[in-house]
Image: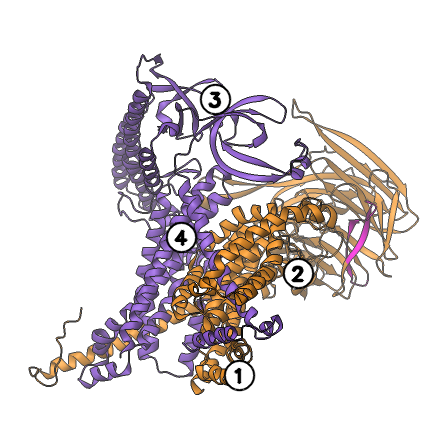
Chain colours: A purple, B orange
């Protein structure tokens, strides 16, 4: 390209009269060129730096880092025993420490401050503790120390010293091995309980609720005969009997799962008995080999993407958020594709090209730049309150006053997103169509094909990569957009997925979870931000990877397309 | 889907006419379908604008009233009423006559439901009444012998079965006993007032001879038994002016008196000591009332002016009554002021039967009309302020249905400084909701617009230099191979979800900046000179390394250099702080320079949002520069200009409209961005350009408040005003940018 060539000329020109002075160099504008180049480098550094940072923080979380046992002298001069994993190290200026009343030795300018993840929240009240490096008197990495991941109260760090079964201390040679076996047993039982709770019992409850709604419907319709009511009552009694039966099973299971407990010793030699049913996993990071660490790492990553969140989203996985995002985006694509493509085809192929079409084109183009929150407000006001409210009045009267479609949900969120991405699809469809040379159209028409046949057989297939690009960009945008969703149906914790085993299987009126909102919610609304932060980084990384992949695919298709039609 | 086989005009089998007919029918059908679909989709998209307008419009519609005659010639027990009221559902009314008959009646038919005699002495008649605005239902009446009684009236909703069987059961209670609570004998009573809150009941009566008598009855609740004991604190004083009106402040600290010379006097309530006198005008004050909340006093005078005053805390921590605003829209003497019970609005009746509906915060007369029903003997405003019950002469009963949904909206309340209650001076404030009913909503959009512009400005300050310089280099100097990589990489920045940028800004960058504030400024100071020095050295250097970096690849060479300079800046930050700022710039700023510092501030938002805007500006500007025909710069170079000179004097001026349109689209994005500002600012609606303080933007405000606002309420609609403002702003900016770009495209094609 000319610019580059001239640029090259410029530099060589500079080089040829080497002896020129600083003044001449400045006058030629070369320093400015250099600064402009720096702007590019800074932008690149920012992108690379950001992604690297998120990647490092997000991926590091699952690695089984070493547990240190410390003898630490705190600010009051007391010696305490601590055990924990290092989660952050920073330097603090001595002045700031002095200002907050912490004594610092003379002549020291900065002090290393370490954030230690000590776990054991039920004992000390806090998961994390800041310690100052000078206070560390002794530091070891004992092999036997274990990290326990639990259903509640976060992690526990300590030594396993014994096991109990139904309150009786077990004689065991290999305590750790037995412990692992019993964790597996508890895990099996936990799966059974979850299946019972989320599957069978939830299904029965769902059916009972349906019966209640049907009864209400009968009342609303003014049915006075007793026969239909009796029928409903009979069915309800059956279901209630079923429910009772399941409930008994559940009680039985939860009794079985509570059989074992483990006795742990904390770093300050306190013995604690923990119920084993709440222990999800246990490992001894200091004695793990590299391969074991790798295995552990991938297990944790897998658990992260396949499990439900725990403890107000600060632990566990993000499966429902992934599920919600994907389902929302899919539903959005189903809506946006036909409408966007039809509108694009209409504008390019059928509409009379004139001033009006030009104005519409500009308007549609600009809608892509309208802030997403405006779409959110529109979605809330028009879709949820106006349309949803009317749908409830017409079809779901029996459920009122609790709204069915009259509140935010997956369906409205998808439609709002479809509206938001519609301009992208229309514009790219139009561009795709515009790129097809006139000669192809004329050739087809000259052979006697109708306009529709020309479109369907030649133009649209040729333009399909362009349309695909638009769709992929739309999907990428929808997957990352959060602001409008906050108004139309995303929640921090959805009790059930929008897709389940209860007829009609797909429940588009339900609220759902979303990766982007998950980041916002856990990062900013969570009670325990410190503990949740690594998970937010991991979630962010996942979202970035998905969106970057989608964008790269779109760019790739676009580039290929350009190559393909260059000859035409 | 399409079953038609390929048609070959040359060798294909001969098809029947029906086949061709079907084809052309299909073609027409598709034409219709696509046209309908296309127009439908496009209008659906444009619907957004009209929907926003539709939601916003009711804010600006005037209030309307509708006078409905309920009954003529109602046979009241006594022809003259001293008190009239109506309950929330507009179904049951209460009328107290001069002879002390308290009569509940059905509003819809005007027939009596229940009558009760108030415990009056023989041969006395009631002459005046007053209702407490804080506690619905507490009413004081006074007899011609100066004996003041207090009763309350309550309405209980009962269901005897099913939703449709609602019944409202009224009752009258005497929680403070049936005896007279205050006695002001031997004079003609000029005005009375009552005020009631959780702690005390206060009564006041004034005589035409200038006497004021006050009775404060404290309600002390025994914690163990729950029993309420009443304790009385009386006070009496003699004034040297003619008292025409009286009212009591809601906090029970002050008593306000109006006189016949247009003065308003503030007295200490428990001692009746005169504290302050404010001159409102020359006409006599005719009536006074507290506004909802018991903070503002409304005083109507004989000339038709209504003044609003409230106590303002001064420099010395003393309260002084200030005249806040005056309404001069009515021309006859104000007879009665009726405050609304849910909003800061009020109704005023004048001597010529003119009725004005006002709103204090909005500073406007919402509606004015002359009551055609003649001079009203009694008025009662319903608790929802949607109906005014009017008792006319000869026992006629009318209901003025009032549709006044959004009185608090006016140009001044949305965009100008407003003097709110409990504020020291007029200010721009956005504070949309609070826990109590008596709260004065503050709907000034100015701080939000200010916050939006502040965030956008700092973002643009960060983004413009990087994006434009980067675009110029990429388009004009960079080698094509590198450009093929760099351009998509920077464009991918645009695809990064803003929630991630906001999260990084709020949770990582903001604390980092707080810790390393000095380093940020050191980087700004060190980078440009460092780069230039290196450039000069690189220019002078001639050696093997130079061949490793071909022309147009400088950015790659600079990456390690920039990292190095950044480290240098970080390392230098410590000593520089110790030298100039006492060891810590951040502490120095708040303690020495007096600049408040929030962790999530405009600097953080500027960087994060700037980061989000860079790719937009970069991409459009780069396209514009790259598209400048080569012949132009070739000509310039051939005439001896250096590449930089060609860029600055020839290429950039030609591409400037495109660059400008890139800036505008970037601005549009910065203005509408939600998640970054939501997460990286404190979201406090303050108005200050300080780089180290936060802001609240229109978009973030919508995201935070819209889900909780009541559908159809003023707050909800104002949020839609904000959405409409955003919509129009971005739409206009983007359209402008698009037109400029199209013109530019035409220009290039002619070159």
Same subunit: marks 2 and 4: no
- The subunit letter for the residue under badge 4 reads A
Q: State the residue in front, A72 or A364.
A: A72
- The subunit letter for the residue under badge 2 reads B
Q: State the residue in front, A430 or A328.
A: A430
- State how far apart marks 4 and 1 are (Cα): 48 Å
Q: Residues within 10 Å of mark 1 (few under 14, many from 20)?
A: few
- State how far apart marks 3 and 2 are (Cα): 62 Å
The question of residue B318 being in magenta is answered with yes
User: Residue at (31%, 44%) from the top-left corner?
Assistant: A214
> Which residue is labeled 1 in the image?
B640
> Which residue is labeled 2 in the image?
B413
* Contact (Cβ within 8 Å) of mark 2 with mark 4: no
- The subunit letter for the residue under badge 3 reads A
* Contact (Cβ within 8 Å) of mark 3 with mark 2: no
Same subunit: marks 1 and 3: no
Q: Is residue B82 found left or right of A37 in the rendered image?
A: right
> Which residue is labeled 3 in the image?
A267
Magenta highlight range? B303-324
Image quarter of residue B67:
bottom right
- State how far apart marks 4 and 3 are (Cα): 39 Å
> Which residue is labeled 4 in the image?
A544
Same subunit: marks 1 and 2: yes
Nearer to us of marks 2 and 4 is 4
User: Mark 4 or 3 closer to N-term?
Assistant: 3
- State how far apart marks 1 and 2 are (Cα): 62 Å
Q: Residues within 10 Å of mark 3 (few under 14, many from 20)?
A: many
Q: Can residue A407 be spotted in the picture? A: no
Q: Is residue B345 found left or right of B19 in the rendered image?
A: right
* Contact (Cβ within 8 Å) of mark 1 with mark 3: no
């Amino acid at each position: 390209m000319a610019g580059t060539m001239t640029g090259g000329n410029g530099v060589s020109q500079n080089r040829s009269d080497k002896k020129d002075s600083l003044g001449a160099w400045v006058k030629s504008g070369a320093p400015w060129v250099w600064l402009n180049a720096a702007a590019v480098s800074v932008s690149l550094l920012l992108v690379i730096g950001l992604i690297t940072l998120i990647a490092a923080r997000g991926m590091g979380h699952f690695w089984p880092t070493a547990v240190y046992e410390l003898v630490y002298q705190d600010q009051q001069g007391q010696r305490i025993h601590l055990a924990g994993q290092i989660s952050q190290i920073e330097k603090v200026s001595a002045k700031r420490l002095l200002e907050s009343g912490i004594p610092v030795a003379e002549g020291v300018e900065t002090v290393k401050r370490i954030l230690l993840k000590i776990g054991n929240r039920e004992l000390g009240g806090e998961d994390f503790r800041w310690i100052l490096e000078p206070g560390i008197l002794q530091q070891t990495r004992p092999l036997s120390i274990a990290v326990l991941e639990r259903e509640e109260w976060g992690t526990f760090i300590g030594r396993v010293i014994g096991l109990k079964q139904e309150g009786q201390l077990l004689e065991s040679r290999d305590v750790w091995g037995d412990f692992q076996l019993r964790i597996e047993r508890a895990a099996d039982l936990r799966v059974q309980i979850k299946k019972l709770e989320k599957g069978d019992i939830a299904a029965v409850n769902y059916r009972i609720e349906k019966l209640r709604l049907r009864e209400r419907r009968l009342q609303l319709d003014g049915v006075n005969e007793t026969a239909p009511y009796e029928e409903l009552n009979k069915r309800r009694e059956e279901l209630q009997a079923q429910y009772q039966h399941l409930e008994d099973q559940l009680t039985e299971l939860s009794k079985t799962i509570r059989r074992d407990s483990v006795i742990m010793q904390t770093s300050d030699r306190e013995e604690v008995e923990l119920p084993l049913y709440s222990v999800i996993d246990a490992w001894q990071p200091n004695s793990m080999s590299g391969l074991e660490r790798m295995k552990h790492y991938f297990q944790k990553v897998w658990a992260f993407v396949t499990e439900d969140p725990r403890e107000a989203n600060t632990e566990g996985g993000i499966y429902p958020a992934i599920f919600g995002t994907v389902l929302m985006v899919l539903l959005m694509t189903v809506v946006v594709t036909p409408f966007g493509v039809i509108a694009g085809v209409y504008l390019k192929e059928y509409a009379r090209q004139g001033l009006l079409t030009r104005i519409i084109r500009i308007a549609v183009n600009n809608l892509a730049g309208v802030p997403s929150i405006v779409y959110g407000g529109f979605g809330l006001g028009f879709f949820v309150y106006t349309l949803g409210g009317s749908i409830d009045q017409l079809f779901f009267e029996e459920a009122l006053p609790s709204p069915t479609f009259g509140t935010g949900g997956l369906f409205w969120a998808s439609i709002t997103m479809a509206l938001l991405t519609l301009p992208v699809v229309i514009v790219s469809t139009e561009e795709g169509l515009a790129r097809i040379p006139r000669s192809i159209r004329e050739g087809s028409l000259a052979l006697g094909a109708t306009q529709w046949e020309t479109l369907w057989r030649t133009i649209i297939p040729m333009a399909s990569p362009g349309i695909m690009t638009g769709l992929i960009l739309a999907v990428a945008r929808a997957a990352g957009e959060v602001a409008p969703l906050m108004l139309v149906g995303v929640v921090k914790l959805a009790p059930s997925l929008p897709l389940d085993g209860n007829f009609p299987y797909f429940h588009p009126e339900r609220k759902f979870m979303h990766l982007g909102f998950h980041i916002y919610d856990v990062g900013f609304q969570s009670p325990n931000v410190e503990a949740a932060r690594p998970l937010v980084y991991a979630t962010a990384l996942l979202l970035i990877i998905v969106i970057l992949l989608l964008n790269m695919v779109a760019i790739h298709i676009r580039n290929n397309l350009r190559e393909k039609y260059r000859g035409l | 889907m399409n079953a038609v086989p390929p048609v070959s005009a040359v060798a294909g089998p001969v098809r029947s006419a029906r086949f061709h007919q079907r084809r052309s029918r299909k073609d027409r059908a598709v034409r219709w379908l696509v046209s309908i679909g296309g127009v439908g989709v496009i209008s659906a998209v444009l619907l957004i604008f009209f929907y926003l307008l539709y939601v916003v419009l009711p804010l600006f519609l005037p209030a309307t009233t509708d006078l409905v005659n309920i009954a003529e010639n109602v046979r009241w027990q006594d022809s003259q009423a001293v008190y009239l009221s109506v309950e929330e559902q507009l179904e049951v009314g209460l009328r107290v006559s001069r002879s002390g008959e308290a009569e509940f009646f059905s509003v819809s038919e005007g027939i009596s439901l229940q009558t009760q005699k108030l415990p009056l002495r023989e041969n006395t008649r009631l002459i005046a009444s007053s209702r407490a605005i804080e506690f619905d239902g507490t009413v004081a009446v006074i007899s011609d012998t100066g004996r003041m009684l207090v009763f309350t009236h309550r309405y209980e909703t009962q269901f005897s079965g099913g939703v449709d069987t609602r019944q409202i059961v009224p009752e009258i209670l005497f929680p403070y006993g049936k005896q007279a609570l205050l006695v002001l004998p031997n004079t003609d009573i000029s005005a009375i007032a009552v005020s009631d809150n959780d702690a005390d009941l206060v009564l006041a009566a004034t005589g035409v001879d200038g006497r004021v008598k006050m009775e404060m009855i404290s309600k002390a609740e025994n914690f163990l038994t729950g029993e309420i004991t009443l304790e009385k604190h009386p006070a009496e004083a003699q004034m040297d002016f003619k008292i025409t009106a009286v009212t009591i402040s809601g906090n029970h600290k002050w008593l306000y008196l109006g006189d016949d010379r247009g003065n308003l006097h503030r007295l200490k309530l428990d001692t009746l000591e005169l504290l302050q006198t404010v001159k409102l005008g020359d006409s006599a004050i005719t009536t006074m009332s507290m506004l909802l909340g018991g903070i503002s006093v409304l005083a109507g005078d004989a000339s038709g002016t209504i003044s609003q005053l409230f106590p303002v805390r001064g420099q010395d921590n003393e309260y002084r009554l200030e005249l806040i605003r005056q309404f001069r829209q009515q021309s006859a003497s104000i007879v009665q002021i009726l405050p609304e019970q849910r909003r800061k609005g009020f109704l005023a009746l004048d001597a010529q039967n003119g009725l004005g509906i006002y709103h204090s915060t909005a500073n406007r007369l919402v509606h004015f009309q002359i009551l055609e029903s003649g001079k009203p003997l009694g008025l009662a405003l319903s608790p929802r302020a949607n109906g005014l019950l009017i008792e006319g002469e000869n026992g006629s009963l009318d209901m003025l249905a009032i549709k006044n949904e959004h009185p608090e909206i006016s140009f001044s309340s949305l965009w100008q400084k407003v003097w709110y209650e409990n504020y020291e001076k007029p200010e721009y404030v956005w504070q949309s909701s609070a826990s109590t009913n008596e709260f004065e909503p503050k709907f000034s959009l100015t701080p939000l617009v200010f916050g939006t512009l502040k965030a956008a400005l700092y973002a643009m300050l960060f983004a413009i230099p990087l994006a434009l310089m980067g675009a110029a280099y990429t388009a004009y100097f960079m080698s094509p191979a590198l450009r093929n990589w760099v351009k998509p990489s920077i464009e991918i920045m645009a695809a990064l979800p803003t929630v991630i940028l906001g999260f990084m800004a709020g949770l990582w960058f903001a604390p980092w900046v707080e810790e390393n504030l000095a380093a940020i400024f050191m980087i700004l100071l060190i980078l440009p000179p460092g780069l230039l020095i290196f450039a000069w050295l690189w220019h002078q250097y001639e050696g093997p390394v130079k061949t490793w970096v071909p022309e147009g690849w400088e950015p790659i060479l600079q990456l390690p250099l920039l990292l190095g300079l950044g480290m240098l800046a970080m390392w230098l930050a410590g000593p520089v702080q110790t030298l100039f700022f006492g060891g810590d710039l951040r502490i120095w700023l708040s303690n020495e320079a007096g600049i408040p510092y929030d962790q999530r501030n405009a600097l953080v938002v500027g960087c994060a949002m700037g980061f989000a805007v860079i790719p937009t500006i970069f991409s459009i500007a780069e396209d514009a520069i790259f598209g400048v025909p080569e012949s132009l710069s070739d000509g310039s170079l051939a005439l001896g200009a250096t590449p930089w000179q060609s860029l600055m004097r020839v290429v950039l001026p030609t591409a400037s409209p495109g660059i400008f349109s890139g800036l505008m689209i970037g601005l549009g994005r910065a203005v509408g961005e939600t998640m970054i500002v939501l997460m990286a600012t404190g979201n406090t609606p303050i108005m200050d350009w300080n780089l180290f303080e936060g802001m609240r933007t229109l978009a973030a405000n919508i995201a935070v408040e819209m889900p909780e606002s009541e559908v159809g309420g003023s707050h909800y609609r104002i949020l839609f005003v904000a959405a409409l403002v955003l919509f129009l702003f971005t739409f206009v900016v983007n359209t402008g940018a698009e037109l400029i770009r199209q013109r530019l495209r035409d220009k290039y094609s002619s070159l």
